[in-house]
């Protein structure tokens, strides 16, 4: 049981139980669990890096009933991102919650969410994915409502219900696939779908149900309506986790289904619909972010836009034959997702600090606060430039390759979408940053609250410097897994 | 990447200002000495490193830093003759401007922030100069935008915020067009390396239509920073920045980055022959000529000294584009040498304008009566810069105009002479009245806001010597134009290589 | 008994559609929660119908296991939704009494 694959899920789960049993030690135990989980994720990455895709059957049953775990390049990259971000969020949270009740409810739920997240990335069969998805949704909604104020509870109740609807729709799709192929294992199902073009109706229906349900959870326009209030009203570390990780998990699952399972039926024409919705999401989300009055609402709408970018890759992947060009697109897609994970988490953590310091997060009145907290403003600036896609940042490379793919496949209209989205993103980020150059008194030192500012700054730096200047290893990691898109 | 001297030097040159910049952000506001030490260490170290680079390039060594960002996307920094020209200019002027800025901002706030971004700005400029391919160029070009924005907004007044916003709107949009052009070009050719003579000759004629559109995108992106009319609107607005920033913006960093980019794209991507065949040079020359005349006319109407200088920049930087747009090595020499000459002359003028404002509170031309008697050395430096801009021998500007005119004749484009003559008249029209006021009008009873520094000179030493030194450079560049290692000789070397002579 | 299996599955699908419809058109929280549970029950019915392998063979255990797990998940989700709903109601009453 010391396989990093298992530890990634077991450690946070164990941590969640311990903090529930010993609430007095919640912070200490929580941070120990966070550290050990993140270490397990690093160990997992190292193993996958060396040996390629890992498979594991838990419980000694055969493929039908056992819990199948699998870590390929895509999953590992996301696990590593999620766990490093999770560690940053945990460190930040140690200083964020002061109320004893909040501390005691935060840690168990947070570690549960973490376990569900890792479980979702690493699950190898459709039903475990469903369980993890539900667990994730429940933990996320409970965490989001933690502040207990009316807006937060209302928004997160809606989030919970919408999420449940999405999961049920997904589950019905699973039922259809089980009817047709009698298995839930992703690998076996992929073979089945590929071998049975005559079952096109069942495949298409299952795909529609599953992808639509997950698109609801991933907040793809126009199914994004629940996201901005839920993310904007949650406590800052929770907002960071929701926006950076939880939404990404739903998208990950869509990607898995799209590339591994349904690739025989997801051709250009099919891929156009989500991509067009993604394009509208980019424009609409960015526009609403620009019009947002509050910093956290801005960040939440920016997530709607950033998720939109990820869907733009689907028709490009469909139009590009297997080879280096397609690998580049896949890596760019992942790179955008990873960059957004780090950057959005950094942004939300910094925004939370601004909020606690100023007592509000109305953008127009932030002048003095932005001046007083240079490190926080820097974190916002760095993560902001990663959100815009300015160089050097992972999303700059991602957008470069996205546009390259769009031009190479003749789908030049996506270039216009990306350009417009980038301009809007610059406008909303610099709307915030321009507050930092007012006439308010000058700060005397760079860092004021290390425990909160260092995680935010580190996450932002990773999105900019590490992913922007050294994203090569991602290709290696993906190349190790069977990330060829089922082909 | 490998780890030997020749493959590290270009990267280290960029880092030599980047690292001090990062540390400066962390310096506490009141630690004046530590910040100054960091600033000057970076500037001097960079100067020494660039000295080594010039020596090496002169010996024929190849310097190249390559960092693979992702498969197929490589950050390349290398030193060819053209990059050496621009790197040297920015490094020398950075050192001088740093000294000036330390003096200028002696008692102001937010200095750690200012000098941090100041260093980032120079790192980006040097990165642009050393870029070995279009991707690297785009990356540093965008970083330059980001690093200059806080400098323009530095004062914090509503006008500063507004000016910075306009600056950002122009440059980010331009940067995006450049990015789209660069990506598009890459899909046609693979990695776009800068190679003397261009890399697009082998492309089939069927792609020429796309190449023209791409050139339009690239030119629009570069033209914003180079302040080509009608993309120049940001430049007069960003005049709200503190004087050292204006100096840097106008002489070294931003406008030069745009002009340098145009030179790179024309010579080292398209190749001057292909650019001529596609009719791109004609478009560029019309744009540049129009900008030269239009900028000068607008400059005449400005009373604010910095605004007048700003429109003068709009006009003067297009000399570089004009030289680039004329087919023939002589015009190329004229354009390239003006890259340096405009830099040293314009920085002199901006330093002086800053001195007038800091010492006497004089910001408008109409207030400049008699400043020559109150501040003789500063005004002498200003005079040299202004006469150079007009093109009076033996100051540097004359050399530029001479070669441009000669180049126009060589290319059979005699209208260039008309443009040059018009521009010279207009230059005289907006500079000579200033000189007349400064030297020959009587002193006013009192200055708008006089500042007395504890010194026996007309103003603080850190403010006085930088313009004096750059004014001496202007004279030397003109007088010793034929000496080895002069800007002119170096520009000749580049032109020979570009034309394969 | 193919028809029984078919009927069961079709009823499940119908429950799913009914629940979905009810969820989308009804505003009150309680109705939405019940609607979701009906939707879920519909999917469970489909699973149970799948498990049927004829009168002589024992039913497929896998869908049964899935349904059991699914029920547990649905119950906990419902509990959380009810709790959040109750808290929301408290907050609203507090607002009114103020």
Image (cartoon, rainbow, N blue to C red):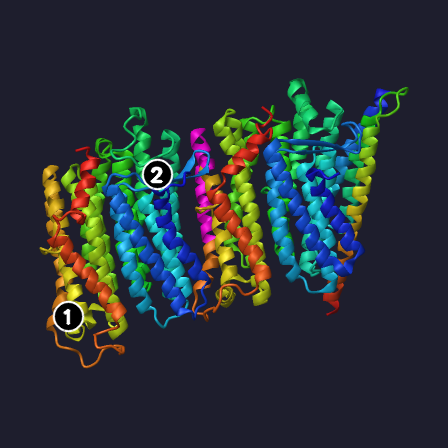
Please state which of residues B99 and C31 is positioned toward the viewer in this rendering: B99
Where's residue A137, x and y in %? Answer: 70, 46
Q: Residue B23, image x and y in percent?
A: 44, 59
Disc 1 is placed on an element classified as: helix
Depth check: B184 or A179 in front?
B184
- Span colored in magenta: A401-428
**Element type at mark 2:** loop
User: Residue at 19% of width from left, 45% of height from top?
Assistant: B490
User: As drawn, is A425 to the left or to the right of A233?
Assistant: left
> Do discs 1 and 2 share a chain?
yes
- Which numbered disc, 1 or 2, marks the residue that appears first in the sequence? 2
Res B154 quadrant in image: bottom left
Q: Which residue is mark 1?
A: B438
Q: Position of residue B177 (x, y in %)?
A: 37, 42
* Quadrant of the image containing the N terminus of chain A: top right
Pointer 2: what residue?
Answer: B133
- Of A348 and B101, nearer the camera is B101
Specify the principal SS of the magenta part. Answer: helix
């Amino acid at each position: 049981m010391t396989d990093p694959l298992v530890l990634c899920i077991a450690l946070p789960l164990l941590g969640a139980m311990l903090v529930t049993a010993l609430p007095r030690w919640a912070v200490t135990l929580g941070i120990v669990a966070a550290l050990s989980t993140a270490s397990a994720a690093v160990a997992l990455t190292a193993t996958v890096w060396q040996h390629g895709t890992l498979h594991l059957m838990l419980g000694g049953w055969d493929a039908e009933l056992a819990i199948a775990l699998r870590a390929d390049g895509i999953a590992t990259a996301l696990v590593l991102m999620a766990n490093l971000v999770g560690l940053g969020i945990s460190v930040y949270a140690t200083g964020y919650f002061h109320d004893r009740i909040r501390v005691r409810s935060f840690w168990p739920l947070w570690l549960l969410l973490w376990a569900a997240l890792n479980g979702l990335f690493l699950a190898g069969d459709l039903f475990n994915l469903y369980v993890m998805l539900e667990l994730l949704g429940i933990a996320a909604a409970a965490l989001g409502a933690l502040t207990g104020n009316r807006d937060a509870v209302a928004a997160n109740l809606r989030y919970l219900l919408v999420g449940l609807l999405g999961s049920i729709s997904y589950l019905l799709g699973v039922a259809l696939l089980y009817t047709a192929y009698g298995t839930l294992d992703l690998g076996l199902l992929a073979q089945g779908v590929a071998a049975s073009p005559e079952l096109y109706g069942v495949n298409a229906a299952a795909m529609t149900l599953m992808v639509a349900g997950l698109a609801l959870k991933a907040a793809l326009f126009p199914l994004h309506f629940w996201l901005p209030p839920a993310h904007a009203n949650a406590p800052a570390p929770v907002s960071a986790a929701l926006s950076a990780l939880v939404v990404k998990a739903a998208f990950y699952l869509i990607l898995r289904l799209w590339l591994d399972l349904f690739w025989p039926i997801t051709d250009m024409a099919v891929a156009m619909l989500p991509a067009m919705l993604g394009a509208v999401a980019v424009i609409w989300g960015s526009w609403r972010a620009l019009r947002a009055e509050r910093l956290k609402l801005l960040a939440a709408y920016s997530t709607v836009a950033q998720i939109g970018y990820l869907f733009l890759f689907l028709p490009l992947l469909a139009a590009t034959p297997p080879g280096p060009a397609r690998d580049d697109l896949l890596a760019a897609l992942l790179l955008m997702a990873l960059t957004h994970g780090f950057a959005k988490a950094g942004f939300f953590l910094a925004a939370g600090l601004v909020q606690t310091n100023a007592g509000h997060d109305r953008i127009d009145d932030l002048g003095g606060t932005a001046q007083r907290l240079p490190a926080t403003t820097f974190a916002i600036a760095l993560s902001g430039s990663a959100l815009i896609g300015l160089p050097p940042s992972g999303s700059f490379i991602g957008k470069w390759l996205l546009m390259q793919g769009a031009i190479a496949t003749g789908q030049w209209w996506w270039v216009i979408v990306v350009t417009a989205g980038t301009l809007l993103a610059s406008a909303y980020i610099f709307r915030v940053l321009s507050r930092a150059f007012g006439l308010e008194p000058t700060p005397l030192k760079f860092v004021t609250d290390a425990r909160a500012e260092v995680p935010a700054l580190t996450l932002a730096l990773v999105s900019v410097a590490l992913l922007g200047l050294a994203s090569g290893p991602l290709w290696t990691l993906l190349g190790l897994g069977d990330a060829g898109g089922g082909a | 990447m490998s780890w030997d001297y020749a493959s590290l030097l270009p990267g280290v040159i960029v880092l030599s200002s980047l690292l001090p910049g990062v540390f400066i952000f962390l310096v506490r506001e009141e630690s004046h000495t530590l910040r100054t030490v960091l600033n000057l260490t970076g500037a001097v170290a960079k100067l020494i490193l660039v000295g080594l680079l010039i020596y090496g390039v002169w010996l024929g060594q190849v310097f190249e830093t390559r960092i693979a960002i992702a498969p197929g996307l490589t950050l390349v920094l290398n030193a060819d003759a053209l990059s050496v020209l621009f790197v040297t200019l920015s490094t020398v002027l950075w050192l001088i401007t740093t000294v000036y800025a330390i003096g200028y901002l002696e008692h102001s706030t937010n200095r750690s922030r200012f000098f941090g971004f100041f260093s980032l700005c120079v790192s980006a400029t040097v990165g642009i100069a050393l870029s070995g391919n279009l991707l690297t160029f785009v990356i540093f070009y965008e970083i330059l935008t980001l690093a200059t924005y806080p400098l323009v907004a530095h004062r914090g007044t509503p006008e500063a915020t507004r000016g910075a916003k306009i600056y950002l709107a122009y440059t980010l949009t331009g940067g995006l067009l450049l990015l789209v052009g660069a990506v598009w070009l890459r899909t046609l050719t693979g990695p776009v390396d800068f190679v003397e003579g261009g890399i697009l000759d082998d492309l089939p004629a069927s792609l020429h239509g796309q190449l023209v559109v791409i050139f339009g995108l690239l030119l629009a992106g570069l033209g914003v920073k180079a302040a080509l009319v009608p993309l120049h609107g940001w430049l007069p607005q960003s005049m709200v920045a503190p004087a050292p920033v204006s100096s840097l913006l106008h002489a070294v960093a931003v406008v030069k980055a745009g002009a340098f980019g145009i030179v790179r794209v024309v010579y080292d991507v398209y190749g001057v022959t292909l650019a001529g065949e596609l009719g791109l040079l004609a478009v560029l020359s019309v744009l540049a000529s129009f900008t030269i005349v239009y900028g000068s006319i607008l400059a005449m109407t400005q009373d604010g000294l910095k605004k007048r200088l700003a429109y003068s920049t709009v006009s003067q930087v297009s000399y570089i584009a004009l030289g680039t747009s004329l087919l023939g090595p002589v015009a190329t020499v004229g354009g390239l040498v003006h890259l340096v000459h405009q830099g040293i002359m314009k920085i002199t003028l901006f330093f002086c304008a800053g001195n007038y404002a800091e010492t006497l509170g004089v910001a408008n031309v109409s207030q400049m009566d008699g400043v020559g008697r109150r501040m003789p050395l500063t005004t002498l430096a200003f005079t040299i810069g202004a006469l150079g801009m007009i093109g009076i021998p033996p100051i540097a500007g004359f050399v530029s105009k001479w070669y441009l005119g000669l180049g126009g004749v060589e290319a059979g484009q005699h209208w260039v002479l008309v443009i040059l003559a018009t521009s010279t008249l207009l230059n005289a029209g907006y500079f000579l009245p200033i000189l007349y006021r400064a030297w020959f009008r009587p002193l006013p009873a009192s200055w708008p806001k006089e500042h007395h520094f504890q010194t026996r000179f007309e103003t603080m030493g850190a403010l006085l010597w930088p313009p004096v030194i750059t004014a001496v450079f202007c004279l030397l560049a003109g007088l010793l134009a034929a000496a080895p290692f002069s800007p002119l000789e170096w520009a000749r070397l580049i032109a020979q290589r570009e034309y394969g002579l | 008994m193919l028809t029984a299996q078919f009927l069961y599955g079709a009823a499940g699908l119908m429950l799913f559609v009914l629940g979905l419809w009810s969820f989308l058109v009804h505003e009150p929280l309680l109705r939405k929660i019940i609607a979701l549970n009906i939707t879920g029950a519909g999917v469970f019915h489909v699973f149970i119908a799948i498990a049927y392998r004829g009168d002589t063979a024992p039913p497929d255990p896998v869908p049964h296991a899935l349904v059991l797990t699914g029920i547990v998940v649905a119950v906990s989700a419902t509990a959380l939704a009810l709790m959040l709903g109750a808290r929301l109601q408290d907050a609203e009453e507090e607002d009114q009494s103020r």
